[in-house]
Amino acid sequence: MENGSLAAGAGEELLDSYEQERRPVAESLLHLSTRLLESQKQGGIKRERDVQQLDIHYTNSPLAHTLPEHQHGLQAGERAPDAPLLGAGGQSLRLFQLLQGPDWNLLAYETRGKVIDARQGLRIHHIGEQDELIDTMGHLRESYHLASGECVLIRPDGYVGAFFHSNQINDIENYLSRFAIGIKDEYHYL
């Protein structure tokens, strides 16, 4: 690993996970390209799910951390779903609007207060009746299978990195440190 990559802020373990995640995807895309070329030679191309790459997941990645009770439904390493939310001022917005940009995002669901200290490269969003964002229709809770006090960490590429309980502060901090996600800095609010 070159020092230039590490100096940019990415931890060595995070950078090492890239090949483990992307190599199977690259091999799959090469196989898909070959199939599509053969299909075109025979007179037609059929658009399949794999062309849209909606089934790509990283559930076996070292970045994926799931709670024992999250064995069903959305898993760490899968694509993060969108959900409608309401801002504290009453404005409608989509979760994907919050996830735009190069930062990791921690969604703290009905956590009743600060979970961890904010840091550069990590945006923290509190979701609950008395928080900055409100899940009025329960779409976020249902899509992510969240219970009160749970958090989901979403990677910059739009995949779920981890699920945590808000009382697992040491686990959250260790995860962030392990992959050198940001340094303690300022709190980011919408």
Image: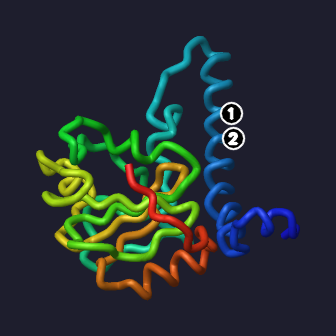
| Picture residue at 67% right of the left edge, 24% below the top | 37
Image location of residue 87, percent across then percent down: 24, 44
In the picture, the disc for residue 30 is 2
Relative height, residue 77 to residue 34 (above, below):
below
Crowding at label 2, few (<14), some or many (≥20) Cα neighbours within 10 Å? few
Give 110 or 154, whichever is nearer the viewer: 110
| Residue found at x 66% / y 25% | 38
- Amino acid tagged 1: Thr
Q: Which residue is mark 1?
A: 34
Q: Is residue 71 visible?
A: yes
**In this picture, is 35 found above or below 173?**
above
* Quarter assignment of residue 72: bottom left
Drawn side of residue 95 relative to residue 29, left or right: left
Answer whether labels 2 and 1 touch (C-beta < 8 Å).
Answer: yes
Q: Nearer the viewer, residue 146 or 25?
A: 146
Q: Secondary structure at mark 2?
A: helix
